Amino acid sequence: MSGELGQPQEGPSHSGLYLPNPEGNEAEVQRSVNQRVGTPRRRSWIQNVLEQITDSPRRCSTPLEVVPVAVLAVQRYLLEGEPRDMEPKPPLYCYDVTISDGVFREKCYLDPSLNFLVYKNILKVGIEVKISRVSCIYNEKRLGQVILCIDNVHCGEPLDSISLEIPFRNRAHREIPERPLRGGKSHYLALWNNEDPYGDIWLSNKQPEEHNFNSKIISLSHLEMTWSNIRNFPALLVRILHKSKLRYYGKPNKKMIEPYQTFLEVADSSGTVSVIMWNALCPEWYKSLHVGLVLLLQDYSIKKSHPFRMQPLPVDPQIKLISTMEKQVKPEWRLPKLNHRFVTRSELDDMPENSICDVIGVLVFVGRVQRSKNKESREDFWSYRWIHIADGTSKKPFIVELFSTSQPEVFENIYPMAHFTCTQLKVVRNDTQVPELLYLTTTNESRMFITGHRGQPYTNDTKVKNFIQWIKTKTSSGELKNTVIGGYYPYPPVPETFSKYNISVKVELFFTAISEVRKEIEDLQYREQKRIAIQGIITVIKYVPYSGATESASASEILRNANRRSTSQAARRESQSQERDGEPRDNGPVSSQCCHTTSASLSPPKKKRALQGPCAKPIPVPQPETSAQRKGSKPDMPITFQRRESTRTGCIGKARKTISGKWESQMWREKKFGLIDHLRYSCIYPESIPRRFVLEHRNFLTQQYNSQPAKYIPQEGRPPNLYDFKSALVLGHFEVTILGLNHEIAISVAFLPEYSPEDVRTSQIDTLLTCMNYSCVFPQELTGNDRFQGPKTVTGDIIKAATELDKVHIVGILDICNLGNGKTEVYLHKIYRPDKTS
């Protein structure tokens, strides 16, 4: 059967400026606005611009007046069906941007040369922009339809609030379902991945229909034996055992209206089979179908199964697996009992690699949403986040790599302290690696549940009942309050030796030249995180203590720091003078990692971008005293830490140990003024600090660590500040400067140690400190009321440890992260010494 239902009219536009009577539409809408708000009528900037440019289609024009407008939506789609002679070949995806001038709303087409502003999350909802060049495109297949195109835009600061009462100037933009401005597509895609259903074409809660079961029904086993000789297949009555995430297979110049596909594994009492649901059936049925639902399937076709498709394990080992066919679907068949594979955390230690299991527990850590490229040569990304789940059977949590499972309503709303169930997880482990690698990752058939367990098919499972009893005792005693959300999460760890890591990385070009690191960083898109390896020599290590006070730097302080960073020779001499005096060059939100302007578009001024969003301020590096201030005082005063005596074997010291604030090699003193370039990525932004979760502010916190939404969402009341939430880290971080082997380029990066009984995330046992023979205290074996007590503890002398690395050739494993809006961080994840085997 064809899934291509209700195909819209093709052409460059389904909507735009309708010219036959534009003034009439404007007057009608404007009168209603004036009556409602009681304000005098004022002229719309959008209307003025459209009237200015409609006589010059395809030609860029500068508006007579450039005024700020608000961004209400940024929506993505695949541009298909466009004549190739209309314009140069665009990128794979295009964007429509909805703006408001306070009088009207207008949906505009973003010129593809400006797509990078969306890739970097610079152009986003909720901000003020100034559009300085525009053009228009006519839809020659429809009367009077013209699209306003944005050809140059200056992105400004976030707005406190934007009215959603402003009407669309063009009535076509109000149509439901929403349609893209250009191409033959009937719908928008999710902004940051292709797996999530997005928009109003996706129906929810589709109600089952009454059906007379007098029609002929065939069993799967009988159908397997006879399907090649049957023309009209009888109905199947089956139960859904597994449901896969969506697959989007749209391509340019392919006239598929809704190119989606999903797999269902269904069964009756005689066997199981794979069902493929295609195209328009996916928006109609996908969100309504769930595991355990009974379907009556009719009007389907049958094909031989794809030999390379990985099928999930049978739910019931006694059910025969029928793999000789696949088919298209509509509704239901007979109910084999659903059997889940719940495992406890204590049982996970004994499970072999690639095993499939289900887990239930309470979320104790929820990481920020990150993205990884699906294919290096494409614009497609996977969305994922790391979570920790506790079930009371072990002191260790489940560590889960949670990819989007086409359930954005769950994926974007998980939070610490919530009860969480996830099915069809695969075990990833490596027992020969130190530290031992053990975590779970989602599969194509994984499903998530978070809104309670009543009515779910797994509630009668013994392990589920045991968890529910355990969580009741913890909830009543208030022991689940110490949970964490967000922050940089360096997982999975790399192998302990360079030789093992070399084997594990299956690429021909293993290293990234230090001169190429900047390009690697600039190529990253929003929330993309990538791991690279560089070679060099550690020349500077500086400890930056964590302080809630330093995190709350004022806006004026950040602007002063931004203004200091100039490319002029005078600023360079001043910066070098500061380094001679011992003052570090601060790496604020605007530095070498920020987007560069192009002739096609002007990105926001650096001063403005320093303050975009509540999370834009980096944690400033505490400024040391100048040389004049230090006269008469002792240089390099050590930073002192108090610690409790540890009962763990191998811990050093009992009462007080010190760390010197900074170590600098003689080589650095000789080479730093002759560098060609010094890449500075050692600042840590507030959203990279894990925070203590506060249930009363769960909506605010989940928004901070989710991806940027495609549509503007008004804040409820006055939102808190991210700085108001206590950090889960106590120790602070290190700034590490690595000099390239040719002594021409250096890079300064951050190292964020995460050892603490208070830190519920997994500790990185093999890290910078241990590689420097630096003795540090790992999480203690704590029981009862001792859990989460005591400050983070560190022992040893960093100068002594760092001296052992002086002039030593090292391999540094770096995690590079793009936070959007010009903010990039680089973390030192691991150091190897190639001259040593350990």
Image (cartoon, rainbow, N blue to C red):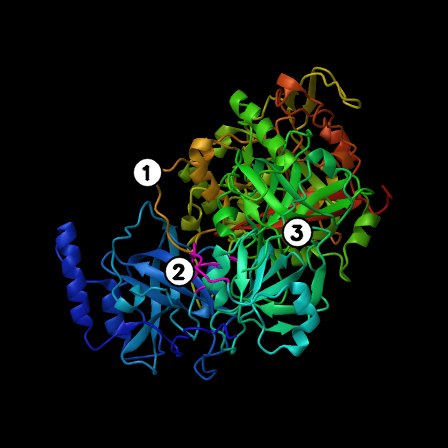
Q: What residue is disc 3 on?
A: 675
What secondary structure is marked by label 2? loop
Q: Position of residue 623 (x, y in %)?
A: 54, 33
Type of residue at label 2? Asp
Q: Separation of disc 2 and disc 1 at Cα?
A: 27 Å
Total marks shown come to 3
Q: Residue at x 44, y 68 (%)?
A: 600
Element on which disc 1 rests: loop
Which sits earlier in the primary sequence, circle 2 or circle 3?
2
**Residue at 23%, 68% in the rendered image:** 48
Instruction: Look at the picture and state if 305 lies above or below 725.
Output: below
Name the mark nearer the viewer: 1 or 3. Answer: 1
From the viewer's perspective, is the residue at label 2 or at label 3 nearer?
Answer: 2
Please report the bounds of the magenta region as a residue range.
Answer: 188-213
Which mark sits nearer the N-terminus, 1 or 3?
3
- Report the Cα–Cα distance between label 2 and label 3: 55 Å
Tell me the number on the disc at residue 200.
Answer: 2
